[in-house]
Structure formats: C-alpha cells, structure tokens
Image (cartoon, helix red, strand yellow):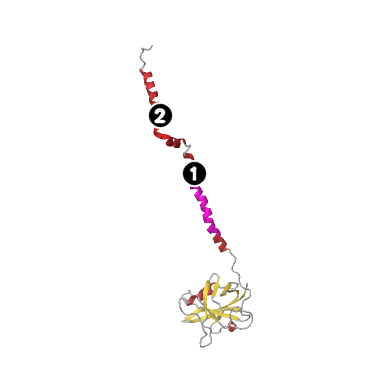
C-alpha cells in the first residue's frame, strides 16, 4: 500500500487545504495585533463610541452654553421698571424718556424771547431731538406747570413729529435730573389753533404737572404752523 500512487483528485484536495491554511496565517500576520483588534471591535469599539459621544455631547452642551444669554435677555426684557421718586426737591431736568418715542432726550433751558415766549431748541440736527424747558417752574415743585416744548419739522423727523404720532392719554413720561427721577402720566392731549393759543398752558398754580407743546396742523410757512398740540401729565409713581 505504501508503494501505491495517490490519485490526482485526492492530491489536489490536499494541496488546496494546505494553501488555505497558509493564506489564513499570512492574512493574520499582515493584519498585526492592532489591526486584528480593530477588526474584532474589542479596542476600536470604545474609541469609536467615545468619538460618537463627544460628537453628540457637543450639541447637548451647546444649549447649556446658549441658554444663559437667552435667560439674561428674558430677565432684562421683563425686569421691573426703575422706581420713580415719590417726592423730591425741585430739580433741573436733564433728560426725558417717553417709552416708544424717545429715550434720554436732552433737555436744555434757553431764555425767553423778547415777547416773553419760552425759548425753543436750536434749529439743528441735534436740536430737533431735544426738549426745551422754561425754568420758571421746575419738576418737583408743589404747584404749577413745568413748561416744555419741542420742534416739529416738515420732513417728519423731529421729536415733535414723533410725539404727535405716538403720545396719547395714559402714556408715561419720565423726567430725570441728577439722582432725581419723576414719572408722569399723560392726562390730556389737546389741539388748538395757534391764533387762539391755550392760556392754561402757563398756569403757575393748581396741581403740579408737566405741559408739553409742539407745532401741529398745516405748515403755513417757515416756522409758521396752523395749530399747537399740548399734553398735560400728572406725577405718577
């Protein structure tokens, strides 16, 4: 039997089996330990998972980062309004805020003209955003009207135009000077012919209030308007 030749088909099968084993061993040696681990997933699994967690955790941390400004904004938007003084000594007004119309508008105090009419802001770009205050009666005084005025421009860009468009009965006006802060609520808005005027605008007795006048109606010429609109506002904490 030892001298009998091996059939060709059997010999081919043996050679094929030996070749398969050699290929398998060669493949394992080519992969190397690290690459084999990667292929098996034992070492690469955690690293890939860590990457996925890092990738997915970034968005989860992003809301935490962006939520702070959002909270701050909401808090600022809904923060209580600054308190108004209940009672102060008479003071010189420096700024006036009318919510939705002007914030911190400058107040100046020009002298009265030769006809004893309260002075007005200058006819300049800066002047069109100012209030003029007649210093006969100051905010904080126990009686009489604090007299204020502002310009109306034909192009619609001055403070007077904005007051005409937006200031109504019930609205709030804040007058500030130094550390003093008085708040007022509009109690009346009235429009009269310039030729008629409104004498009670100049009242020096009666309850304390502010009185603001601006030109209104049709513009008849430079500095000449058909009507005057006046707002009266009483102190309100």
Of residues 102 and 60, the one drawn nearer to the viewer in this rendering = 60
Query: Is residue 155 shown above or below 19?
Result: below
Looking at the rendered image, the quarter that the N terminus falls into is: top left
Q: Nearer the viewer, residue 182 or 156?
A: 182
Q: Which residue is mark 2?
A: 25
Spatial CA span between label 2 and label 1: 32 Å
Residue 128: in magenta span? no
Residue 111 position, x and y percent, is 52, 84
Which quadrant holds residue 16? Answer: top left
Q: Is the residue marked by circle 2 packed among few (<14), some (14-19), or many (20+) residues within 10 Å?
A: few
* Percent x, y of residue 26: 39, 30
**Secondary structure state at the residue bearing disc 2:** helix
Q: Quadrant of the C terminus?
A: bottom right
Instruction: Please determine whether, in this image, residue 71 is positioned above or below residue 18.
Output: below
Task: Assign the magenta stretch its main secondary structure.
Answer: helix
Answer whether labels 2 and 1 touch (C-beta < 8 Å): no
In the rendered structure, which segment of residues is drawn in magenta? 53-71
Residue topped by disc 1:
50
Badge 1 marks a residue whose secondary structure is: helix
Q: Residue at x 49, y 42 (%)?
A: 49
Residue 14 percent coordinates (x, y): 39, 21
Residue shown at the point (39%, 24%) measured from the top left = 18
Residue farthest to the front, as pictured: 33
* 100 on left or right of 13: right
Residue drawn where x is 56% and y is 61% of the image? 74
- Relative to residue 55, is residue 192 depicted above or below? below
Let me know if residue 59 is in the magenta part. yes
């Amino acid at each position: 039997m030892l001298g009998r030749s091996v059939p060709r088909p059997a010999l081919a099968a043996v050679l094929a089996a030996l070749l398969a084993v050699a290929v398998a061993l060669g493949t394992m040696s080519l992969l190397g330990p690290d690459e084999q681990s990667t292929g098996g997933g034992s070492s690469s699994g955690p690293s890939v998972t860590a990457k996925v967690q890092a990738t997915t955790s970034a968005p989860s941390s992003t809301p935490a980062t962006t939520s702070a400004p959002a909270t701050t904004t909401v808090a600022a938007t809904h923060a209580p309004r600054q308190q108004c003084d209940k009672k102060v000594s008479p003071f010189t007004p420096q700024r006036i805020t009318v919510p939705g119309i002007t914030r911190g508008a400058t107040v100046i105090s020009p002298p009265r003209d030769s006809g004893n009419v309260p002075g007005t802001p200058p006819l300049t770009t800066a002047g069109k955003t100012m209030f003029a205050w007649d210093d006969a009666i100051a905010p904080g005084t126990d009686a009489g009207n604090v007299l204020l005025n502002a310009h109306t421009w034909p192009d619609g860009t001055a403070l007077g135009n904005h007051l005409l468009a937006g200031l109504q009965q019930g609205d709030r006006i804040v007058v500030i000077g130094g550390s003093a802060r008085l708040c007022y609520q509009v109690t009346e808005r009235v429009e009269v012919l310039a030729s008629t005027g409104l004498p009670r605008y100049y009242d020096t007795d009666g309850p304390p209030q502010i009185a603001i006048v601006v030109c209104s109606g049709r513009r008849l010429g430079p500095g000449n308007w058909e009507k005057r609109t006046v707002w009266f506002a009483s102190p309100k904490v």
